Every structure is written in C-alpha cells, then in structure tokens.
Amino acid sequence: MKRLASLTLAGFFAIPIRADDFAASAATVGRNGASIITPANQLITPAGIQVELPGMRPQALALSPDGKMLVTAGLTHELVALEPVTGKILQRVALPSDRVLEPKPVATTILDADERAQLSFTGLKFSPDGSRIYLANVNGDIKVFSVSREKKISPIFSMELPPANAPERKNEIPAGLAVSADGKKLYVALNLSNRLAELDAATGKVLRIWPVGVAPFDVVLAGHKIYVSNWGGRRPDAGSVTGPAGRGTRVRVDARSIASEGSVTVIDLAQGNVAAGVQPGGKDGGD
C-alpha cells in the first residue's frame, strides 16, 4: 500500500524539467544527399528532381501550352520560369509596377517594379497561345507578362480591379484565373467581394461581373459555362448563423463557429446569368 500511495502522490507534484536535462542534437536539418531531414527527424526522399526556391513557398504553377516552360510564384516578389524536364531556372522576372496600367512592354529589370506585390492564394495562367502570363496579386490587381518567341518573359502592366469595398479593406483580393479559348477574355475570382469578373484580356477593361458564393477560390472554364469554387459556400441570409470571414465579411458557420459548407457556382456565359449553385452532395446551393 505504501508503494502504491507514493506512486499516486507523485502524480500531484510538478517536477521541474529543463532543456538541459536532455541531450542536445547537432543534426543538420535540410539536404542530406538525395534526401531531406525535417525538423521532426524524418528522412524524406522525394521522387524526381527537386528545385530549391528559398523564401518563395510556391503557391501556384502554370505550364506553357507547348510544355516547354513552367512558371511559379509565391511569397517573393517575382515570377520564376523553369525548364520542366531538367528543373533549370531560366529566368526570374520582377512583377510589373502598379503604376503601369497600360499594356506597354517594359524592361525585365524595371526600376519601378512592384516590390510589395506577391501571388495571391492562387491565380497563375498562360494565355492559350502562350504569349501572355497572368498573375493574381494579393494586393488587388492582375500582373501581366509577355512571352516572346524566344521564351523571354517581360513584365508589361497591371490590370486594375474594381474595389471590393469590404468593411475593413477597399482593395480586392483576386484568386483563381481562367482564360477563354480565343485568349480574348480573362476571368478572375474576386475572393473578398464574392464575385466573378470578366475582363478584356488585352486591356483589363471590366466587361461583366457576377455574384457567386462566399470567398470564391478557383475558376474553370468549359465551353460556354464557367465554374467557380466557393470556400465559404452560399451567401448568408437573414436566418443564417454566421461568423467572421475576414476583413469584416461574414460566412455561414456551424454550432462550433466553424465555416460549415462550400459550394460551386455555375455561370452560363452565353446567357450571361448564374445558372446554378451546387453544394457537395448534389444539392442546389444557390449563390
């Protein structure tokens, strides 16, 4: 009984533990030949070629229509082009200035590059003929680049987007992009204002705007219909339980105050209207 009592009592006393009580490790985190050692002492051996992009944390990829160039972007203020087969970095391109709002080619090493801009959640596309690249800038515009026949990328200009005018932010947050088959129209998910915009792909002029669900993320174009994935599902109505969705906007939530649904908005471009809003499970979700 004494032994049992002593063990039980031990559980009620805090025993101080210091870092010095454990053996230190000087193991290097990172590359180890063809493998990588993680901070959790896991050894990972990736398949294929690994291209290191320090500081970038790439968030999107786009492959040119001819398959000869891969571009990526992330937290750094640049677009990086790679050779898809070898992984060789071909070019690093500064993002076009937000003061250049007309499609006039500028030098790759532009002095007034937008050093605050970076890729949004997603949003990186080639035009169907491979002559342009579009990048969604989290600060509220679309960065446009030209691609020469020699595969040289040059920053051209920035496309202004209509303001979101959310309670806590004026500028929009663009996300997913899609380009029409003829290359004449660019579709942009406007994540903050819950809309989809159709732009003139050459000039950035806004042609049409549709309401979609909450926090639209990505866009897919198929024939005369366009599909928009909505992170936050349907827009809240008067009877909805809601929580904050960011920048003063609201989203439907469950009893745990967690966003409770997602949806897909279907827009018929030929008719010019929202054809349907679909929730997982096949239910009509509205917008």
Image: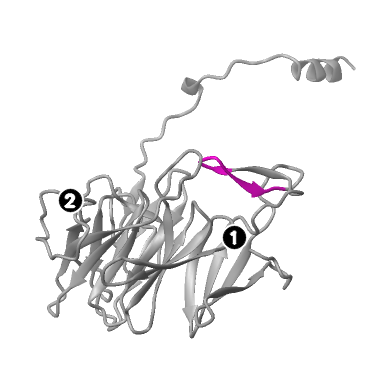
Rendered residue at 22%/49% (across/down): 114
Which residue carries the number 2 mark?
113
**Image label count:** 2
- Mark earlier in primary sequence (1, 2): 2
Amino acid type shown at disc 1: Gly
Q: Residue 240 at x, y = what percent?
A: 74, 49
Q: Is residue 4 above or below residue 239?
A: above
Q: CA distance from mark 1 to mark 2?
A: 34 Å
Q: 10 Å neighbourhood of mark 2: few (<14), some, or many (≥20)? A: many
Q: Of circles 1 and 2, which is in front? A: 1
SS at mark 2?
loop
Question: Horizontal placement of 78 versus 191: left or right?
Answer: left
Secondary structure of the residue carrying tag 1 is loop
Contact check, label 1 and label 2, Cβ < 8 Å: no
Queried whether the magenta region covers residue 216, the answer comes back as no
Task: Please identify the quarter of the rendering in which residue 148 is found.
Answer: bottom left
Tell me the number on the disc at residue 213. 1
Residue stretch rendered in magenta on the structure: 245-253
